[in-house]
Amino acid sequence: MKLNFEEIFIGDLDLTFAAEITIRTLIMFAMVLVVLRMSGKKGVRQLSLFEVAIIIALGSAAGDPMFNKESSILTSVVVFAAIIILYRLITLWASKSEKFERIIEGDPLYVIENGEFILLDNLSHTFAKDEFFAEMRQVSIEHLGQIKTAILETNGNISFYYYEDHEVKYGLPIQPKVYEKKSEQVPETGIYACTYCGHTQELQQGISHCPHCKRKEWVKALNTKRLT
């Protein structure tokens, strides 16, 4: 079977309409930028789920007029206006009602307290464990014992509150080469961290179950001070 590359890449595209597509795309792209600027946000990490839904709606409204002859730009302008009015009304209502704001934005989640995970099952719906470790390494965290509290904010950012140097505890190491030394068999007596929940305790040589999560995989705990 011989492939028709002209049909694949060009099809029945008219060169005149190709120029029109370019103009339509520039106009719609500019409109999307204007509307996003009107929202007051500075970047993607500041967006809540509600605001992501708004952006998806804007993208859908902007997409058709870029390449569809049957879709006029004026129609998209009406859709854009409706979306931005809806956005303004909902944000106004949310600013006056904490209950409604929680419904729209969600609640912050406490992920780490006292150097241990407390919502790892809930966290896994948002972050893979390795991804969460990467977030911690980017702010110079070496192990969980350096963290007093970690809060997953509604916009996806993570807020960390640290122990003072003299308060740092033994904790689960998050550096890949150290974490990968995990094992169900404790090689020698010492302080170890559960690789699932981060609970630390002194263990004897052999196999032990974590009293918190009932897992039995451990790694040698660290208590080094945080580098700032």
Image (tube, rainbow, N blue to C red):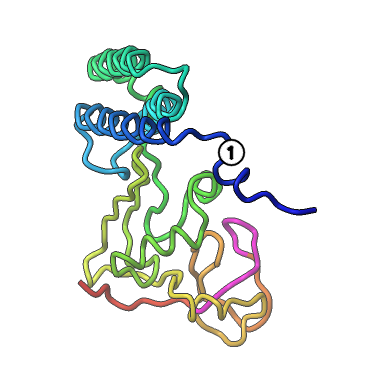
Is the C terminus in the top left, top right, bottom left or bottom right quadrant? bottom left
Frontmost residue, 146 versus 12? 12
Q: Answer above or below: position of 225 versus 34.
A: below
**Residue visible at 29% across and 50% down?**
159
Name which residue type carries label 1.
Gly
Give yes or no for residue 56 being in the magenta stretch. no
**Residue visible at 29% across and 65% down?**
139
- Residue carrying label 1: 11
The quarter of the picture where residue 137 lies is: bottom left
State the count of labels.
Answer: 1
Frontmost residue, 143 versus 48? 48
Q: Can you see residue 60?
A: yes
Q: Answer above or below: position of 143 versus 41.
A: below
What predominant SS class does the magenta segment belong to? Answer: loop
x, y (%) of residue 90? 31, 16
Q: Which residues are magenta?
A: 210-220
Residue 119 left/right relative to 228: right
x, y (%) of residue 161? 26, 55
Query: Given the current orientation, which residue lies at the most extreme bottom position?
Result: 188
The quarter of the picture where residue 210 lies is: bottom right
Q: Answer above or below: position of 168 versus 74.
A: below
x, y (%) of residue 208? 65, 71
Label 1 residue SS: loop
Q: Can you see residue 50?
A: no
Give yes or no for residue 213 being in the magenta stretch. yes
**Residue visible at 36% across and 72% down?**
142
x, y (%) of residue 214? 64, 59
Frontmost residue, 109 versus 139? 139
The quarter of the picture where residue 78 lies is: top left
Residue 126 left/right relative to 94: right
